[in-house]
Amino acid sequence: MLTQQDLKQIAQRGISEEQIETQLNQFKTGFPFLRLEAAAAVGRGIVAPTEDERRQYVATWEQYKAEGKKVVKFVPASGAASRMFKNMFAFVDADYDVPTTDFEKKYFDQIEKFAFYDALDEVCKKNEGKSVKELIAAGQYKAVASNMLKKEGLNYGQLPKGMLLFHKYPEGARTPMEEHLVEGALYAASNGEAHVHFTVSHEHLDFFKQKVAEKADGFAQKYGIKYDISFSEQKPSTDTVAANPDNTPFREADGSLLFRPGGHGALIENLNEIDADVIFIKNIDNVVPDRLKPETTEWKQIIAGVLVALQQKAFEYLRLLDGNPTETQIAEIAQFVEKCLCTDPKQQKVNAQYLRAKLNRPMRVCGVVKNVGEPGGGPFLTYNQDGTVSLQILESSQIDTQNEEYMKMFTQGTHFNPVDLVCAVKDYQGKPFNLPEFVDKTTGFISSKSKGGKELKALELPGLWNGAMSNWSTIFVEVPLGTFNPVKTVNDLLREQHQ
């Protein structure tokens, strides 16, 4: 099935022939749905700390940073913003010339509220010889939208989200990239240094670097810190081969194999190369202006304090297991694993070997918010490959929609995953874990796409905060809805939280 040319193409990407065969086989067999025990809820898998506990966790985090530990803020930032502007692309291509849908009317009615308004006004004057207001008065709405989207204007239809102007300030508008630099200074700086890592796509790397070079010094002075800012790209070796509907390799017009990015799960490789004790993970578009940052900062410190407190206890117990623990100590450790790390042994024999395996692994604390109907995954108690039950973040694609009981759990779940993680990635002897070892490879999924008018099947790797972290110790903490402010469409920037 694979030609010599195919093998050469595969080798150039750093992918083995065996990996391709595995992927093609996965198209044939599909992926198993996960077996669920229950949706997580406060009191059953989700911690809701009291005010006193919150204060204690913040103090724990401050103490941890004072010990000189290395903290990194990891921001997946490679996504293009094209989906954000889907409605406006549709308007430009529509067979009418004035705003007609509610979305279009809202965009033009409130256009001056956008942080990019001044920049848009400038490019309209340059390209059209008229300001935004003049173009709108003349009924030239499409010229305004085109100048926002197209390359000769702001090029927002092609830029990554991290490079768009999101928020207004007296000194000038800021991009999400800048807001993440500020956040890094506020809760992730230790030893007077904030380490921030962006994953970016190859075509935007130079632009990101240039913008960071322009902006970082100003924030460093403002917050009295130094920045260490690094970048990585999704590795070609994590791309997956595309298949035809009959599961044979999909080929381009020239006969070569088509490879597609493996989704955010590919970033476990990037995360694995970060040298840090603790890593915060947060999506590029989930940022707020400075006036709302105190709440975000406080809750980041709280979930980091929860992580540190539990990790310290786990390390203490691992050292006990290195000796000759008594039966009483084994029982105490088992209680910690079951109650604090929410791992139910089910039929597993609970002995020192089992407890060591459940303690000596990466740990993550995930902030979860009350469900308000946003699309996406949620927190569940799920069966693992070894028959134990633990906490996982699941997407709808991982759940058997034919199973009424599971669908009820999914639709009635009380909480939602906003991608708000803090991770501990070193063991109790200070050695970094090899994170790919903790991926559950059976949790990928297959989606339908097309290329050049031809149908194809695409394979996504286990998601970064889903199956890629399946075999980590996981703790869920309820965080306020105010800490979750994603921008999925351009009009989301008109929400009060982004003004």
Image (cartoon, grey):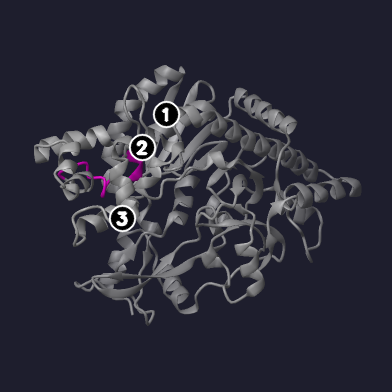
Residue 146's place in the image compared with 255, above or below, is: above
Where disc 3 sits, the SS reads: helix
Residue 166, numbered label: 2
Q: Which residue is drawn at 35% across and 56% down?
A: 236
In this figure, what is the number of numbered marks?
Answer: 3
Residue 87, numbered label: 3
Answer whether residue 9 is magenta in the image. Answer: no
Residue type, mark 2 in image: Phe
Q: Measuring from the top left, give residue 210's x and y in whole percent.
A: 27, 33
Quadrant including the C terminus: top left
Single out the residue that lies furthest toward the front: 137
Residue type, mark 1 in image: Asp
- Give the Cα distance between marks 1 and 3: 38 Å
**Main SS of residues in magenta:** loop
Crowding at mark 2 (Cα within 10 Å: few <14, some 14-19, many 20+) = many
Residue type, mark 3 in image: Asn
Q: Are marks 1 and 2 in contact (CB under 8 Å)?
A: no
Q: Measuring from the top left, give residue 6's x and y in whole percent.
A: 29, 71
- Give the Cα distance between marks 1 and 2: 23 Å
Q: Mark 1 points at which residue?
A: 228
